[in-house]
Every structure is written in structure tokens, then in C-alpha cells.
Amino acid sequence: MSVRAAVLEEIVVTAQKRAASLQDTPIAITAFTASALQDKGVNDISEIAYFTPNLVFDTTSPIGGVSSGAAVFIRGVGNTDFSLTTDPGVGTYVDGVYVSRSVGGVLDVLDVERIEVLRGPQGTLFGRNTIGGAINIISRKPADDFQAFLEATAGIDGRVNVRASVDVPISETLKTAWSVSSKNRDGFVKRPLAGDELGDEDRLSFRGAALFKPNENWDFQASVDYTDIDESSSPSVGVGFTAAFPDGTPGGAGVVGASLVENFSFPLPTGNRLGPLAPGSLSPTGDFFEIVGGGLNIFNQFVVDDIDADVSFGDQVAFSKIEVLGTTFIANYHGDTFDLKYTGSYRNTESKFANDSDNAPFQITEIVNDNYDVDQTTHELQLTGTAFENHFKYAAGIFFFNEKGTDDVRVPVTIPAPGTGPGGGAGFEAAIRNDADVDNSSEAAYLQATYDLTDTWAVTGGIRYTEDEKKYAYTQNIGANLAFDPLLFLIDDVAAQLEPGGPLVPGYIPIIGDGTGSVSETFDETQYYFGVDTKLNDNTLLYYSFSQGFKSGGFVLRYVASVPEVLSFDPETLDSHEVGLKWESADSRYRVNAALFASEYDDIQVTFFDTLGGPLTANAGSADINGFELEATAFLTSSLRLDLGYGYVDAEYTEINPIPGLSAAITKDSKLVNTPENTLSLGLEYATTIASKDATFRIDYSYTDEVYNDSQNSPFLYQESVSFVNASARLDLTENSEVVLWVENLGDERVIVSGNSNFGLGFHSAVPNRPREYGVTYRHRF
């Protein structure tokens, strides 16, 4: 922002598949230009949540420990699970291409022209349906002339970030752009028993793009992007151990099993351990309750008293390795009154990640995803245009999506054998095998059209048909260890086999049916959109819209407790009403956008844990979600700019579906996960001159109400309301270079941003945010 520019920048968005001013678009949108992202110090797309009403963006999934796992919620709608048999509730699109998986989904803002956050269902305009909203990322196109950019950042905790780009025109008709980003910093959660740290950053990203314009009617765009992440797992810490469910009944199978094994055990040839020796022989160390109580006392020594302790006592492997390769091809034909666009894409994600989930030096449970591999292809043909002297505008398209993926999961655990309890039993170390292969496809057709009734009134209608097919093949059983040697006894026969002189029979315990199989199902839905808007004057837009969202059902991927067949869940739907107002002053110094919404959310897909700690997705019930959003930008003086964003959500369950076998049930009084009632952001930017050089000072404040980080409202993951403050000072050294001093989390506030609270296995872990950081950034444009 120059000290001479006291006029708000016009923001052009493409939310309706045509370029239009943000103020003329009847949708609740928060838009960030490249300069706004830079001024606010946004390093990746997750950080836009600080400035966007009713948006929650966690950077890791609660299960698995992957360090780049997007868990996004808008207006209470989203998904915390990354499994291949579920879908995100909020869609991410890069240049119109849907990103199907959350692993690797915390994208860098590399060569980004604009980010649009669209709230509410967006099915009648996007190829891949999205029920809760969309994050639409638009990349910068190659420039006509040679130009280059360099940015270097240094900060505490060994933070070194470098970002560079260069635009190279090959000819009058062929332009190219190349960019690279490197991010490195130390971890902040120490693991003294493992001798390492969690929460470090080691990421390399690359993007190349070419734009070919042979004539006025045709243009072709091709791009390739690559990301390599090689880090520790997400920075979790132990916050509790339990041997009972929230209702007081016995639970915590992992804690019970580990207590029995740690109390007295003997090694087996497979390298795992078994103990006590036989049912009823709980001596010499005491009875069942004494053993479990003693185990809890031991385990709780490795629980942090406060989330800012930044220490984990896990001693097993903890890593997160991700490689993402994406290619996109876009062909545009521009007619006199229409545009025809084809978009084709391919994306591959290869990943391995593991974490010591219990954060203690015992095998209660660990998680190893040693082969996560997903291939995605999309094709979309879209026609946009106008008719009747521009009074009629339309967008229509057909969309094809296919995804093939593998997720092989190994879960070392210590669990009790059936019948274990006060009368006797055995605990044993083992490894759960959850191997999954999926083949998901989607076909859709959509149409949305707007007709100008008068110069000030317009009406819009839309329709979409979606057909999704999901195929899931599995191998699910229990073996002895990560090498998956057979168990030396079968659980059902453990008593007989542990009698003195009894034989130890090798074998595997099937979890689903006989252990292997496949299932498939098809889901289809028709959705509608209706809207009406009016221009009250040149600067004021008032609109109403009704939209429908749909997310298909699927299958539960991971299990601990045995089931006769694969568990499935139904589609979820959302009906949303919205009334909005957009206003800008005649001198373009003040801008206010507001929206009221009321939604009916049915068959909500939620991740729970069963009584043995297995994560399962089920339809929790229905909820009413009502709320309000307000965004305002103003030049209070020619040098002082104010940015304000406020979001309010009132979300309540209205109906609960009974779900058997849960470790912690929900009720109508339960809160929706990742749905704070109030969010607020406030930014002040002051421009002045120092020694004849432009200087800008900025401070950003954000507030988030209390929030539950899991669907079962675990007290171990409850986060009280919190406020954050970031600040920066920028000095323009020359016309092309600048230096920025910055501090993030000025008040050093520490909060729980995610976590895994598992009453079924009895461990509870939380992922804290980073402590205060500060540093300096240098930028130069060539």
C-alpha cells in the first residue's frame, strides 16, 4: 500500500466462472490478492483462516501424524479424516482442478494470483461437488515481459525460507513462468527418549507454467507442480491415559493390555510379549484392578501438565514423507458470445508417515502408514457465455473424475485377550494390518444461468446431477509385529494354549469377515440452486440464494474390533438459505459485505472411535446451522487502513442416529467439531515515510471462541477461546526491494489445534501450535 493510495483495490473473482467484481458477485466470498497475502504474512493456505470468517483450517489429521494434512471446515461443515474411503467437506481447487486428498493438502502460496474462499455449497458451478464450501486458488499467468522475484526469510528456530520466480517469454505467442520455494525450520516438541524433535519443517516446492496464444480465439495453458516434504510427524504430546469410557464403564483396551504386559510378561519367538501367563494367575503382582491402576500410574508420568510443555516421551519412529506431482492442461476457445474450456489434470501423491500415538515409552499404540499412494485424473468441459444482448448469462459443464489409491496401515498395539478382566486374562503385543485399495469415480453435469429481469434485478437458477461409484478392497487382520509374522496363538483359544505345556498355534486373526474381500456402491443425487439479486444503486448489491450440497457415502477403512462385514455410511446433504449485502462507498474508501445463512445439515458424516479404539465414520444425525458473517475494509485516513472480519455460527444437533459400539456417544447437547461460535479478525495497516522511503506498519488480531477438536467432545481436546496477534514493519529500500521485520504469535499463546483422543485404547494426545516466532524477510523484484 502506498501512502498516496487511499482507494480500495478492486478485486476481480471468478467464483461464477466468469470474471466479475467481488462486489457484483452474489456469493459469500473472502478473496485475497497476491499483495494481500504478502502483506498479511501468509506462508501457506492454512493461514488464511486467521482472516476468514467461519473458516477453520487444521494442518494435520488427528489420526496418523501426517504433517501436511488439510482438515478444513466452513460454517461447521468439513471432515477431519484423511482416509481414502471418505471425502473432504470443503473442496480445494487449483486453477479449476479439484484436489481430492487432504494428505499434502496444506499448499504453499507459490506464484498465486488470488485465493477465493466460497462459503456454502457450490455444486452447480464446480466440476467436483463440494458441500461446505470451496477454496479456489488461481495461479499467476506468465507475464508478457521478462521479470523475476526473490524472497528470503530468516527467523528463530533455524527458520530459513527462500522463494523465487522468473518469467521468460519465448516468443510473442509463448510465455513461461517458473517458481520454486524452500522452507526449513527446527522442531519445537522435544523427544528426549528418541533424541529428536517433532514439528520441524523441510519442504521443497516447484511450479512451471506455459501459456500459448496462437491467435485471438485460442489459448493453451500447461503447468506442472511438484512438492517434496521430508519431516517428522505432527508435533503431538501426551495429555492423558484412561481405563474407562466417559460414562464410567471399563474401557481403554490399550492401557489394560499394556498394564498386563508391563506388569509381568515373557517374550515370544516373534519378538513380542505376552502376560500374565495364564487366566486366573494374575499373581505375583496383584489382582486385575491393582495391575491396571498401577499401569495408569506409570503411564501418567509421561503426560504433560500444560500444552506448552513441548515434550513427548514417545520413543518409536515419527516421520512424515510426502511427494506430490501434478500436471494440468487447459484449452480455451473464445467465441464472440461464448467461451469453451477444457481442463484435464493428473495428480499423484506418494507418502509414508508414522507417529508414536501414545507419546509414551510403551507399546500402547503406534501408527505406521507405510504406503499411501493416490493417482487422480480429471476431465472437465465447460461452456460459458451470454445471450439476448448480455441479459442472459450461463455456465454449463460435464465432469469426469477417477481416483485409484492404496493405503497400507500397520498399528502396533498391546491389547487384552477376550475374557480379560477381574477374573483373569492375558495381555499381548500385536500388530493390526489395515490394507486398503480404492477405485473411486465421479461423473457430473451442471448448469447455472442468470437472467437480468431489469437493469437492477436478476434471477439465477442451477441444477447438478452427480453419480459417484466407490470400490474398496481390503486385507484386515492381526499379526504379531510390523513384519507381520503370525501370532503364536489365536485369541479365542488363548486360555487352552497358555496351560502348562499347551501348544502355541501360529495364525492371524481376521478383522473383517475372513480377512479379505471387496465391496462397491454407487451414489447419485440431483441438486438445485436458486438466487435473486438486485442493485439498490451503483454501489449496493442485495441478494438471496438457496443452494443444496451433497457428499456421497462410503466405507469404513480402519478397524480394531472384529466385524462380520465392511461397515458403510450414507451420503450427507445440506440445504442452505443465504441473504447477503455488498456495499462500497462512492469514493471506494469503504467496503462492507455481510451475509446471514440458515442451513439444514442431514446425515452428518462424523469420525468416532469404537470400544477398542478403531476410527469409524458414521452418520451422526442432523443439525441446524445458522449464522452471520461481516467483512469490512476502510481507509480511516489516507494512511490508515482497517480490515475487519467477523463470523458467528449457531450449530445444534436436532436429531441423533443411534450408533452401536462407540467408546463415547454423542447427544443433542454435543458440539460440532471445529465449529467455534465466534471468530473475529482485525487488522490495522499504517503507511508513512521514513527518510523519504515508504514504510508500512501492520498489526493483525484474531480471536477464536472455544472449540472442540473432535466429534466426541473429549475434554482432553477442548480448547478455550484464544486471541492471537501478529505484527510486521516493512521498509521499501528501493523501488524494487523491501525488508520486513515480523513477529508471529506475539503473545506466545499456546493452544490445541488437533489431536487424537481415543477412549477405546485409552490414550489421549494433542497437537499444539508453535510458540512465538520472529524474523526478517527481504524481497527484490527484477
Image (cartoon, grey):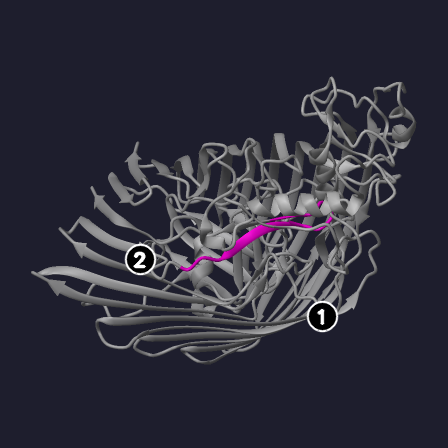
* Residue that protrudes farthest toward the front in the picture: 284
Span of residues in magenta: 749-764
Q: Which residue is mark 1?
A: 669
> Residue 474, how many percent across, how many down?
77, 32
On the question of residue 662 being in view, the answer is yes
Q: Nearer the viewer, mark 1 or mark 2?
A: 1
The residue shown at (25%, 40%) is 148
Along the horizontal axis of the image, is 572 left or right of 34? Answer: right
> Residue 639, how many percent across, how many down?
21, 71
Front residue of 254/123: it is 254
* Residue that protrudes farthest toward the left in the picture: 691
Above or below 613: residue 261: above
The reply to whether discs 1 and 2 touch (Cβ–Cβ < 8 Å) is: no
State how far apart marks 1 and 2 are (Cα): 41 Å
Q: Is residue 759 magenta?
A: yes
> Residue 317, how many percent across, how many down?
55, 31
Query: Which quarter of the figure has residue 422?
Result: top right
Q: Which residue is mark 2?
A: 39
> Residue 604, how many percent across, how many down?
73, 59
Q: Decide which of tag 1 and tag 2 comes sooner along the chain.
A: 2
The residue shown at (39%, 48%) is 112
SS at mark 2?
Answer: helix
Locate the C terminus by quadrant: top left
Along the horizontal axis of the image, is 329 left or right of 90? Answer: left
